[in-house]
Amino acid sequence: MAAQEPIRLEYRMQRGESREYRAHVRSDQVVEDRGESRGATVLADLTLVQKVVDVQPPDTFRLQLIVAAGTVSRDGDTSEIPNRGQVIALELKKNGALVQPAPDVPFSQPAFPDRSLRQGDTWSSSSELIVPVAGPDGRMAGVRREGLVYNYSLWGFRRIMGYDCAQIHVTCPEALIEISPRMSQSISAAGTTFFAYKEGKMVRSEVETVTVLRSPESKVSSTVKVAVEIHEAASTGLAVGGEEFILR
């Protein structure tokens, strides 16, 4: 398909259909407190099964996301994830937007615009982040919602795992959020999604999110890298290893 031809990005699913994904998560955290620094790395490998429970015209899919298996590694020790078998109920629009937020989902996917797109086209969507609010005594006094803006671009087209895919780049510019007069948090993100536009399904997604929590005495920096890939007979596989977050 020529890159200059317009395409529509939308999910296509049938009732009873299942798709299996493999997710690989690397979380690096560094704590700086009164001149001392310590770090920790956590790795997780998950098998996720997405089942289509129902299709509700004109544009909503009722899904179950099942955490079928997984392991988590920290400090050299590997164990089975505690939430194996967890079932997360989702409602997804055909443009990729979730009807309700789903905090337990370990990855996100872009929301597509309701129009045809060409290479180089851009669009934006908003998301809400639930932020704790501290009272005058420093204790948590409640929560509030902060808006984040995600900017997308249809970067190009690539053949991935036998699918003709749209390559979608996403960035979330750094947002600074005040938690209390003495504490703030910044968050930013960037990533790439490969979407099989003929079949209407996500094939691969890679996102890195960076958050920094600051107070006068300390700073906590966290970098979370999530790679998700559909698992089929011809799957190429993903890996997280050493100092790199890589595809292989």
Image (spheres, grey):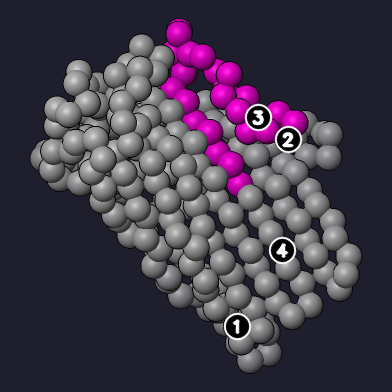
Q: Are marks 2 and 3 in contact (CB under 8 Å)?
A: no
Viewer-nearest of labels 4 and 2?
2
At 35% across and 17% down in the image, what residue appears?
159
Q: Amino acid at mark 4?
A: Val
Count the numbered circles shown. 4
At 75% across and 44% down in the image, what residue appears?
41
Q: Amino acid at mark 2?
A: Glu
The circle drawn on residue 87 is none
* Magenta stretch contains residue 235: yes
Q: Which residue is mark 2?
A: 243
**SS majority, magenta:** strand
Q: Are marks 4 and 3 in contact (CB under 8 Å)?
A: no
Describe the element under mark 4 as helix, strand or loop: strand
Give the x, y percent position of residue 123.
Answer: 26, 51
For the C terminus, give its image quadrant. Answer: top right
Q: Amino acid at mark 3?
A: Val
Q: Which residue is mark 1?
A: 180
- Residue at the far bottom: name it: 136
Viewer-nearest of labels 2 and 3?
2
Q: Is residue 11 shown to the viewer in this render?
A: yes
Q: Quadrant of residue 52?
A: top left
Is 40 above or below relative to 34? above
Q: Which residue is mark 3?
A: 240
Q: Amino acid at mark 1?
A: Ser
Sequence-wise, the earlier of marks 4 and 3 is 4
User: Which residue range is magenta in the image?
Assistant: 224-248
Q: Which residue is mark 4?
A: 220
Q: Using the numbered discs, state the Cα–Cα distance from disc 1 to disc 2 in whole angstroms.
A: 34 Å
